[in-house]
Amino acid sequence: MTIRSLGLALALSCGVVTTVAAAEAPPAVSAPAPLPASRAPGFPEPRVRAWQLGLARPDRLQHAAFSYTAGLMVGLTSESPAAAAAGAFTLGVAKELWDLHRSGFDVMDLVADAVGAAGAAATTRRLTR
């Protein structure tokens, strides 16, 4: 691997790791309006649901960024895209198992980890050619 590609990898990983500092706060929830008969009780409004369930939620972006960075470190060290993806995804699964007894296992967080792991594998493949 050349110094140029190593510098590119470092620049990419530093740019991805930055956290989302100015994340939107969740909208204030006022007293619940009467529910239409067609909606299940306890199901949030679409505006609230968008930030609670979306892939672009700040903590999910952090999952993807961490997986990408960890996978890129493993991938560039081993020069193996498969190791990059496996290492990053394994960390994501371990984190969700850790959360099992705290905030609960979140499949969408695991999807964000998989997106970061796939990105790390693709970047590793590109940089180690």
Image (spheres, grey):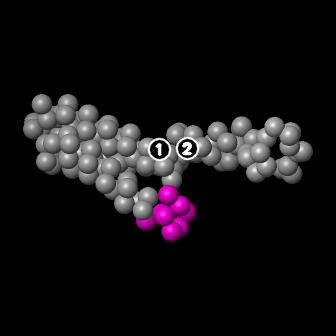
Q: Residue at x 43, y 65 (%)?
A: 98
Residue 93: x and y in percent read 37, 55
Residue 13: x and y in percent read 31, 43
Q: Is residue 5 above or below residue 24?
A: above
Q: In the rendering, which numbered label is found on residue 61?
A: 1
Q: Residue at x 79, y 49 (%)?
A: 41
Side of 47 where 119 appears, left or right = left
Q: Which residues are magenta?
A: 98-105
Residue type at mark 1 is Leu
Q: Which residue is mark 2?
A: 57
Side of 16 where 52 appears, left or right = right
Q: Residues within 10 Å of mark 1 (few under 14, many from 20)?
A: many
Side of 78 where 22 appears, left or right = right
Q: CA distance from mark 2 to mark 1?
A: 6 Å
Residue 61: x and y in percent read 47, 44
State the residue in front, 62 or 21.
62
